[in-house]
Amino acid sequence: MNGAEALLKTLEAHGVTTIFGHPGGTIMPVYDALYDSPIQHILVRHEQGGGHAAEGWARVTGGLGVCMATSGPGATNLVTALADAMMDSLPILAITGNVARPLIGTDAFQEADITGITMPITKHNFLVRHADDVSKTVAEAIRIALSGRPGPVLVDLPKDVQLELTTAPIVGPIPRPAALIPSDSSIEIALGMLRNAKQPVLMVGGGASDAAPAVLEFAHKTGIPVITTLMGLGNFPASDPQWLGMPGMHGSVAANRAITNSDVLIGLGMRFDDRVTGKTSRFAQNAKIIHIDIDTAEHSKLIPAFCAIHGDATETLTRLTASLEPMDLTDWWVKLTDWQARQPNRPAWGAAAAIQMISSQLSGDTIVVSDVGQHQMLTAQLHPFEQPRKWVNSGGAGTMGFALPAALGASLATKQMVVAIAGDGSSQMTIQELATLRKYDIPVKFAIINNGYLGMVRQWQEMFHAKRYSEVYLEDSNPDFPILASAYRIPGFAASTPDELETCIKEWLAVDGPAVLEVRVPQESNVFPMVPAGKGLDEMLDDDPKLEAKELVTA
Amino acid sequence: MKHIFSAFLRDEPRVLTRVTSLFARRGYNIDSLSVGATEQRGISRMTFIADAPAEMANQIQRQLEKLEDVIRVVNHAVEKFVDRELVLLKVKITPETRLEVRMIAEDFRARNVDVGSQSYVFEVTGDEGKITAFIEQMRPFGIIETMRTGRVALSRGSNADIASQVYEGSSSALEHPLAGMAAD
């Protein structure tokens, strides 16, 4: 057995069924071994797409996503996806080829110091120097990717290591330690705080994606309202009356008002990102913070935690629920209910209306993927996520081009139809992956909300740069998306009015296999509510000032 | 405030780069850093000093401990450690200054490790204050070059009774800070 075969055997032993990758010179021994392997390889058209596809896979399954690339430019093309996975704590194994050992450090053809390059954007990385080390290193890499706070791990394999023979045993999954039990003392402090709380709120992030039942139980027993961050959407059902929505820059009125007025705020599996907090000095000024996280480095990193709990989300919440009695929060809910009723006015036709029409055709368990921009915030605001791991987006990194490849990964992982929503700008960053949809007939329904602009940048220029629209206009040079889709032999649809869209959506979703839908929407609509950058959550603009002037109908 | 830390590192390729890259990326201000092998195979020990408020010192420790090759980081509490620094200093001498230079060096218990016709090289060990004072005393004679090792530190064994404060979680300051931790 050579190093390449040891790699694939180890992946098999870990239950890996699919690798997203693109071949090249220094990874060829692995591709040769793949020829005889039961592992399915999905040939993407750009390594970045392979990385995002692995992310989509990891996000919807909670398990490991695997991507692979050759050395040099192949490896550097993975960088964006690895940075994205690091930010959103997704367990990814990236395998890269490298030049043969004697050539390392000589500026050889297609050589790049990928372990050096990815050091700050991976949880850990390895350069394997002997075929005997391949299996144990890959097993260790997978253990690291999945343990504690998950993250991407890269394993770099020089070509001659892939070819070198080895008799080292194949290492199976390394047992994971039991879920971390929080300390009794930290639980006692939190209980004391909660028992005296008059206006408590629970804010749930992506780290609680496997704790949704415990969140529901805690909320229903105590009566405490629940906010879900961008990464936490679906970890508490949107249909539940105790849900206040998403916090932060484009959060709901209810969520941001609740944070500002809370006296005890529990952060669960979330990291107080600047898009959530706004200006930190104005964040939850009246609240004492209980911060539950598996990563102690997040405690008091940005927002001082009065009570820091180091523990597994479910284990911690279960303990809190067991010791708490139903709370009398009647006065608090009077205020909360009032805020919940405050929804922004939106134009009768535009990106928001289009996304709402698409959303209304989907069942609660449909996986929805978004790209990055206005459409992302609108989807997060408008689509009612009912279950965890049904929402896939690039939260921390904000990677344009994420949606299409992530959606194909999510679809292959679940063998289900996946709806992806992108903009005319973001979709073009990875649009070559339409070929991957076609090649494997992956049922991704790809919606492109086309306003002819880089809409979110345009919105900021309108609001903060005196309408000096610098380099955001795309309309004059955008492709005709349905024609582009048909060039890839994928059915394409287009709609410019609500009526056209009504008809189109049904046909688009009914296609057997991939399908593209372009929705042409007015250019000037913006995303509200909005907390302007650098402002506090209490300084939120509830509505688009333009709309009040025009007296447009609420969508 | 100055915080002095000991970090125990696995002797893996690039471990020092991982640590210093983290310092740079997160904007931690490091005054000095010194690293060397320990009595245990495969484990290096690093002493470093950071000028940071208490909250940031805590962040430095937690962020470092997230690195796979960092086994443990100890933030030494004030007055519960001993620290030393070594300096090599090459100073000009003339027939007129030779004697005075040697007398000052004796006051500092500096060892003369190289005797040249126009220069001496001294080796001095001590805490930061002593080293700085020695350099200042030598300056008027004409320092040719110096090299400082940076401070290294160990917790005081005489503080065994308050061991739990010296090494959080460790049973005694008479034990190695990694005692009881899994070998790997």
Image (cartoon, coloured by chain):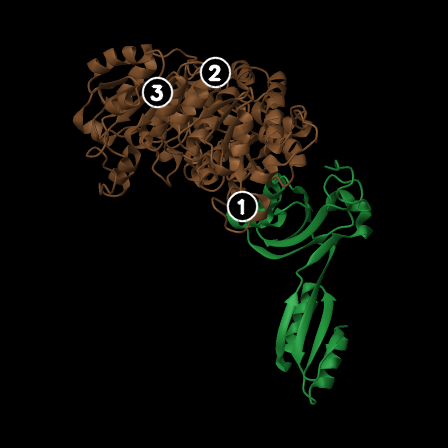
Chain colours: A brown, B green
Given the image, on which type of amino acid does mark 3 rest? Leu
First in sequence, mark 2 or 1: give its number: 1
Given the image, on which type of amino acid does mark 2 rest? Thr
Residue B80 appears left or right of A297: right
Q: Residue A514 carries which label?
A: none
The chain ID associated with circle 2 is A
Q: Mark 1 points at which residue?
A: A116
The kind of secondary structure element at disc 1 is helix
Callout 2 touching callout 3 (CB < 8 Å): no
Q: Which mark is residue A382?
A: 3
Query: CA gap, disc 3 to disc 1?
Result: 41 Å
- Asked if one can make out residue A462 in the rendered structure from this viewpoint, the answer is yes
Q: Where is residue A292 in the image (x, y as percent from the top left)?
A: 57, 29
Callout 2 touching callout 1 (CB < 8 Å): no
Given the image, on which type of amino acid does mark 1 rest? Gly
> Dot 2: few (<14), some (14–19), or many (≥20) neighbours within 10 Å?
few
First in sequence, mark 2 or 3: give its number: 3
Q: Residue A414 carries which label?
A: 2
- Asked if one can make out residue A267 in the rendered structure from this viewpoint, the answer is no
